[in-house]
């Protein structure tokens, strides 16, 4: 099954042109500074969880994609893993003019 993603530079392209960069994880947690009164182990644990753990949810999420076989730009977009449709936070399709599920090329 294939679907299409919207590159901000090139427009809609087949997903096979892209490399998945993973879900948006938010900002990197601050590192514990020695002597600052914070627990270095807690800072290391927070960084480990931020770097290594991925939530595998079946709901719309913000994701990073790389247009590897195209312009080479990295961008983030919202996608619903259940339907592979690009979406917006809180639902609703992106673009709204073209269904991108089950497109075959
Ligand atoms: Zn592109």
Image (spheres, rainbow, N blue to C red):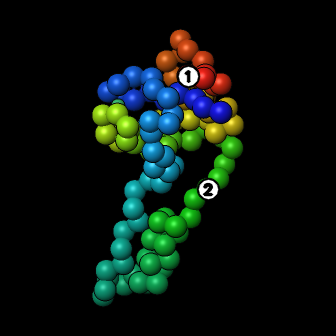
Spatial CA distance of label 2 from label 1 is: 31 Å
Disc 1 crowd, CA 10 A, few/some/many (<14, 14-19, 20+)? few
Task: Name which quarter of the figure residue 68 lies in.
Answer: top left
Q: Nearer the viewer, residue 57 or 7?
A: 7
Q: Residue at x 44, y 53 (%)?
A: 26
* The CB of the residue at mark 1 lies under 8 Å from ligand 1: no
Q: Is residue 91 left or right of residue 33?
A: right
Q: Position of residue 66 (x, y in %)?
A: 39, 42
The residue furthest front is: 105
The residue furthest top is: 97
Marks 2, 1: nearer the viewer: 1
Q: Nearer the viewer, residue 78 or 66?
A: 66
Q: Position of residue 58 (x, y in %)?
A: 69, 44
* The CB of the residue at mark 2 lies under 8 Å from ligand 1: no
Q: Residue at x 45, y 26 (%)?
A: 13
Q: Position of residue 103 (x, y in %)?
A: 61, 22
Q: Position of residue 39 (x, y in %)?
A: 43, 84
Q: Is residue 69 left or right of residue 83?
A: left
Disc 2 crowd, CA 10 A, few/some/many (<14, 14-19, 20+)? few
Q: Nearer the viewer, residue 40 or 60?
A: 60
Q: Secondary structure at mark 2?
A: loop
Mark number displayed over residue 55: 2
Q: Are marks 2 and 1 in contact (CB under 8 Å)?
A: no
- Whereabouts is ligand 1, in terms of quadrant? top left
Quadrant the N terminus occupies: top right
Mark number displayed over residue 105: 1
Q: Secondary structure at mark 1?
A: loop
Compared with 67, 29 (above or below) is below
Q: Residue at x 56, y 64 (%)?
A: 53
Whichever of callouts 2 and 1 sits on the residue coming sooner in the sequence is 2
> Is residue 41 among the parts visible in the rendering?
yes
Q: Residue at x 36, y 74 (%)?
A: 31
């Amino acid at each position: 099954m294939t679907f299409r993603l919207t590159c901000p530079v090139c427009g809609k392209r087949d997903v096979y042109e892209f490399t998945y960069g993973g879900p948006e994880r938010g900002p990197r947690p601050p590192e514990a500074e020695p002597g600052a009164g914070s627990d270095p182990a807690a800072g290391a644990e927070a960084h480990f969880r931020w770097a290594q753990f991925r939530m595998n949810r079946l709901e719309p999420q913000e994701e990073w994609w790389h247009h590897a076989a195209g312009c080479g730009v990295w961008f983030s977009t919202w996608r619903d893993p259940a339907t592979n449709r690009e979406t917006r936070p809180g639902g609703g399709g992106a673009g709204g003019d073209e269904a991108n599920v089950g497109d075959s090329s």
